[in-house]
Image (tube, rainbow, N blue to C red):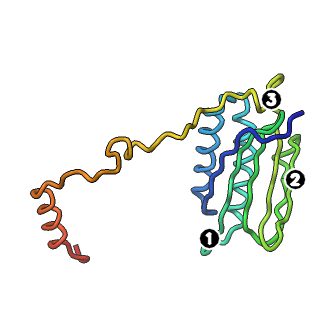
């Protein structure tokens, strides 16, 4: 078995209620981009359970951070969710049947790592990944770094608007 990581995508979120839906969107996008639709429900279940638990245990006055990392290695789909909570959260009953470990991190936080088997006969090396070349940004392509001409009438409208603006509205 090849244990080299083929792909990793991650997302950092603030541990507030909207993190649950943002994490689900990230999972949906990544699973679709990697062309692994049969894995979607399991990955959503794992991520939803863990992110919800972190949000529920976070102080809403001073929320921490959640780092969500999805990866492919060997014949596994890897799900990692890292928090910065004090104290350990268990893997929970929603993750039964999924190889999961929760490791308290030195200092503060926990790392939950779950491994799901890729569909039969598929390895990480064979997953159809998006091609991300070293393409320049669209802005660079459009302007080639040169500054375009400034229209005096446009500049005058901007300056007039700024001088009439006040913090009171």
Image coords of residue 40 (percent x, y): 69, 35
How far is disc 2 from disc 3 in space, using C-alphas? Answer: 22 Å
| Closest to the observer, 42 or 34 | 34
| Label 2 neighbour load within 10 Å: few <14, some 14-19, many 20+ | some
Mark 2 vs mark 3: in front = 3
Report the quarter where the C terminus lies: bottom left
The nearer-to-camera label among 1 and 2 is: 2
Q: x%, y% of residue 17? A: 60, 59
- Left-right relation of 100 to 124: right
Tell me the element at label 1.
loop
* Displayed quadrant of residue 103: bottom right
Task: Indicate which disc, 1 or 3, sits on the residue closer to the N terminus.
Answer: 1
Q: Secondary structure at mark 2?
A: strand
Q: Is residue 45 left or right of residue 166?
A: right
Earlier in the chain: of badge 2 and badge 3, it is 2
Residue drawn at (65%, 28%) of the image: 35
Label 3: few (<14), some (14–19) or many (≥20) C-alpha neighbours in 10 Å: some
- Front position in the image: 2 or 14: 2
Splitting the image into 4 quarters, where does residue 137 fall? top left
Q: Secondary structure at mark 3?
A: loop
Residue under the point 69% across and 68% down: 58
Q: Are marks 2 and 3 in contact (CB under 8 Å)?
A: no
Residue 29, quarter of picture: top right
Query: Which of these two is toward me, 79 or 139?
Result: 139
Residue named by callout 1: 60
The x, y position of residue 145, in whole percent, is 34, 50
In this rendering, the answer to whether 57 lies above or below 116 is below
Left or right, 2 with reference to 21: right
Q: Which residue is mark 2?
A: 101
Dividing the image into 4 quarters, which one contains the N terminus?
A: top right
Where does label 3 land, which residue?
123
Say if mark 1 contacts mark 3, CB within 8 Å. Answer: no
């Amino acid at each position: 078995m090849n244990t080299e990581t083929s792909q990793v995508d991650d997302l950092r979120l603030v541990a507030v209620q909207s993190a649950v839906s943002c994490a689900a969107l990230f999972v949906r996008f990544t699973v679709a981009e990697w062309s692994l639709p049969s894995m979607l429900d399991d990955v959503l279940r794992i991520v939803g359970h863990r992110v919800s638990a972190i949000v529920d245990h976070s102080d809403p006055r001073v929320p921490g951070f959640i780092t969500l990392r999805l990866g492919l290695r060997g014949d596994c789909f890897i799900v990692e969710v890292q928090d910065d909570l004090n104290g350990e959260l268990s893997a929970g009953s929603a993750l039964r049947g999924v190889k999961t470990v929760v490791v308290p991190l030195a200092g503060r936080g926990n790392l939950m790592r779950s491994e799901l088997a890729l569909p039969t006969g598929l390895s990480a090396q064979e997953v159809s990944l998006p091609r991300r070349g070293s393409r320049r940004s669209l802005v660079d392509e459009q302007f080639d770094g040169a500054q375009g001409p400034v229209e005096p009438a446009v500049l005058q409208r901007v300056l007039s608007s700024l001088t009439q603006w006040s913090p009171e509205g």
